[in-house]
Image (cartoon, grey):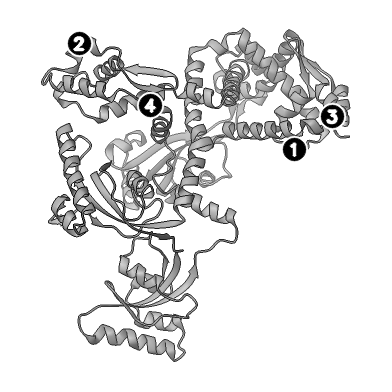
Amino acid sequence: MNLAMVNTSKFLILGSLLFLLTPKLSLGQSNANQIIVGEVGNADVTFSELQENYTQGMNSDVPLEELQSFLPIYLDYKAKLLAAKDQGYYDDSTLVVEHNNYVKQAAYAWWLEKEIKPSAFETFKERSEVELKPYHVLIALDENATEQQINDAIAKLEMARTEIQQGVPLKEVDQKYSTKRGGRSMGGDIPWISAGRTVQPFEDTLYGMDVGEVSKPFRTQFGYHIAVLQDKRERKPARLTSHIYVRGTGDSTSYDKIHEAYDMLERGRLWSEVVPNYSEDGASVRNNGRIGWVSYQSNFAMDFVDAVMQQDPDQAFSEPVQTNYGYHIFKIDSVESYATEAEKDKALMSRLQDTPYYQENNQFVIDYLVDNYGTESNSSFLNQYEAWLLGKDSTALADLSFPADLTDAVVFSFSGNKYNLNDFHSYLQDRFGDRLAINYRENWFENFKRFEADKNLINLTLDRYPQFEDQSENYLNGLVVYNINEDYVWSAATVDTSRLRSIYQNNLDNYRYKERPFYYLVTARHDSTLKEAISFVNEGGELDSLSSKIANLGVSSDSTSGYSEPPFDRLQGMDENSFSEIFEYNNRKAVFWLEDILPARNMTFEEAFNRLLSEFQPQREQEWLEELRETYNVKVYPEKLKEAYQRSSR
């Protein structure tokens, strides 16, 4: 989260605390908060306002000395805001665009932090307590499937659903209806799953079902499914597992080897000794047999996971076990557990952020808002429009006049705004005007909903979270203060160059170049390339033509007065018109050519300009602040600040 959002969160926390604590404030504290400690532009600045802006909403004790230092800075800041307003900075089109862009990005982040993450976490935490055993039938369709293809898939799945409910074996139904790829069904049995292990539409469907129930057809990114919830149980905690592994060979060799390893352990040999001598899993051998956390949510074969989960974690090691991988001796190093609920929540949050439940991107936010704050209506009108559109066949969308009888049909509502079919038609013409009507796709309406939701994001955020306006206003104020500072203090374009020239002329001795070397720095990936360059120059070639004559060579020229820092210390003591030894520089090979020793001389005004500007900046800023203080009648009341502080501390 950015700093502005952090500060806003602090403000919200403080506001809640103040609301709770206000009835308990002593009369002295209340009076202290209202004491006027300064004035700007005929507006009073109270002790409470000063404290709040210093702490950025955090309810913390602040030493008097810090508030005394902050008071004039804060009053100057408010004077800058008044100056920016008077000079039209708040209406500057560039700043308005930059502010709007920031506010929109901040709104995305706000929804993620305030609503989406907490909501997703509660769902994820609840679902993480259980594991589900699903079976599914899948008819694969891509996102551009036609309405006829979709209807055909749904009709087939309804028949499959009826057969399952009538007792036809699941495998038989799957083979009959599921799409085949490479001769294998895309449906079928699915290993135990828990939260975050499959795409969200599939998971949402399963977690809304009872054991034995058959779902209605539903869509995921893979196509249309029906699912059967075969079983449900409490989630089994993951196990940190090590093993000794021997590949299956089809004869007694592997069997004999794993039992020999087991015998060695039984006789008291250390696990760390047996692993390297017997295990054939090279990756885990390097880690004393450790293969990591194993659970029904990991990517191991199901019979392997079953074998691990059946082991007694209190035993030093298991008897030999056979899985599809081969033979194993397991050692359970740890069983997943948490000392506190907070520790568990932290682990779950980390896991959540690696799942489709929660993604930190703008599209994810908009999809959430469409699902939770948007409303579809009059689907029959949308179907009529789609049928009308597809009937226009090879006509470009840009050339289609909207049918008058559908003009007022509202098909989507969001944040108090209603959108009719004519709005949708205009959107299609703007976005897909060159497409043919026959190319219409169902997902275009989803894109339209996202488009309108995104347009209304800021208004919805302000309606839902009025405090978001504070963050927006704070950023705008910071933006205009930065720009007015740039113009009056830092910008070279607005400086009085005559004053700089006067400073330069009155202090010429302060703006001098010392005697310094003028050099070429030549770099390449390989010594051989540099040696070729050195030979070229030594044979009379020009330094300035090096890069055009020799490939993969970098050549730059400059002068420096700093001999002490590497690599420039190599220039010290070099002869003019000579090369240095080859050295390493920025992961490349490099060499210096010393062209000349430039004599000491005074800088020109142009050469000294940036240094003059930097040195003049504090005086320039002070003069501007004095002008602001006079213009906006800035008054500082340090004694009243001290009085307010003492009262608030009682």
Residue 205 is situated, as x and y percent measured from the top left of the image, at 34, 46
Q: Which residue is mark 4?
A: 375
Q: Which residue is mark 3?
A: 29
Mark 3 or mark 1: whose residue is earlier in sequence:
3
In the image, 257 versus 465, the foreground residue is 465
Residue 264 seen: yes
Residue pictured at 23% horizontal, 52% vertical: 165
Residue pictured at 58% horizontal, 26% vertical: 471
| Left or right: 650 as drawn, with respect to 471 | right
Q: CA distance from mark 2 to mark 4?
A: 26 Å
* Disc 2 and disc 4 in contact, CB within 8 angstroms: no
Q: Which residue is mark 1?
A: 60
Mark 1 or mark 2: whose residue is earlier in sequence:
1
On-image quarter of the C terminus:
top right
On-image quarter of the N terminus:
top right
Number of marks drawn: 4
Q: Residues within 10 Å of mark 1 (few under 14, many from 20)?
A: few
Mark 3 or mark 4: whose residue is earlier in sequence:
3
Instruction: Say if 227 sits above or below 69 in the image.
Output: below
